[in-house]
Image: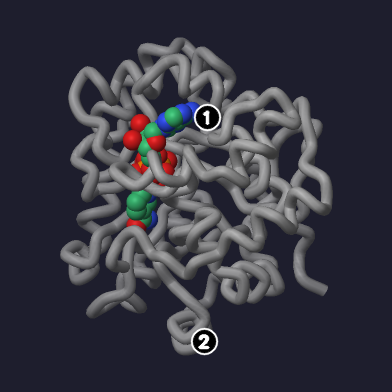
Amino acid sequence: MENDISFNLQTKTVRLNSGYDMPIVGIGTYSLTGATCVNSVSTALQNGYRLIDTAYMYHNEREVGEGIKKSGVPREEIFVITKLYPSQFNDAEKSINEALEKLDIDYIDLMLLHHPGANDVKAYKEMEKAVREGKIRSIGLSNWYIKELESFLPQITIMPALVQNEIHPYYQENEVVPYIQSKGIVVQAWYPLGGRGHQKELLNDKVLKEIAQNHNKSVAQVILRWDIQKEVVVIPGSSNPAHIKENIDIFDFELTAEEMQKIASLERNEKHDWY
Ligand code: NAD
């Protein structure tokens, strides 16, 4: 039997196939740089977040590390995800060491390959080695779909703990999500609110607004709760303290089966980014 990846709504965590527990709501840091990134990370941590998503490509790993120190929250309570970009795959060992140096948090909780690309299997094997060396605790993939997983998985040793893909009510990945979960791999949504530039339309969706009113919650909270009820981890991005607080305040209400169905019917297969 596959490992159990059901969400624990008391602890607000999920146990990865690597044996580590990961929070099911976190903050995404794409497009947050400099002091904005430091402050967003520390604000999130001071407001109960324990999961942070960054990447080499976001050019902010150093600032994420600074935000962690600034928050005063002990490092061991925090779960940090970062990613190797395809341009780094050919020399992944060096890139892993650089990420460790920039983050300055002793070890990386979870490292993902950001996209499929040349040398991705080679890079993954370097991450496997880093797991054995204690530099990384868990490893996974981002922007991998069914076809890509079917050819990738037979070539590697450590099963990915998590796959991070674009998921929101207008792009639900209704076949991909259960496929990944059936392998005991946790699914995480990027662009949960539709992504920068697209969030306005989603946050003004009539169906979502009506559901939000039923619960006295915001549309953002309804979308994030919908993910959680589908056992999909969320990492909404924001530098606005009010939004940061709002986005983790999703554990005091529950969407009905009918509301979940209404949101399912919003699917448009509308991708908001190219990968
Ligand atoms: P998002 O969908 O999380 O947010 C979109 C916009 O919504 C932002 O402009 C934000 O200001 C706004 N917003 C946030 N909370 C709000 C609220 N409560 N009310 C109203 N507006 C709100 O988009 P994102 O931040 O780009 O994506 C989330 C995270 O996913 C990123 O930060 C990054 O960590 C990750 N990501 C990963 C990939 C990948 O390829 N793996 C790609 C894109 C993003």
Disc 2 or 1, which lies upstream in sequence?
1
Residue 161 percent location from the top left of the image: 57, 60
Task: Examine the rendered structure and indicate whether residue 103 appears above or below residue 130.
Answer: above
Amino acid type at circle 2 is: Glu
Which of label 2 and label 1 is nearer to you?
2
Give the side of residue 26 with respect to residue 133, left or right. right
What residue is rendered at 38% in x and 69% in y? 124
| Residue that badge 2 annotates | 150
Amino acid type at circle 1 is: Ile
Residue 173 sits in quarter: bottom right
Residue 177 percent location from the top left of the image: 61, 67
What residue is rendered at 24% in x and 38% in y? 31
Give the side of residue 110 with respect to residue 228, left or right. left
Task: Examine the rendered structure and indicate whether residue 74 appears above or below residue 12.
Answer: above
Residue 115 sits in quarter: bottom left
What residue is rendered at 31% in x and 31% in y? 104
Kindly identify which numbered label has been placed on residue 78: 1
Kindly identify which numbered label has been placed on residue 130: none
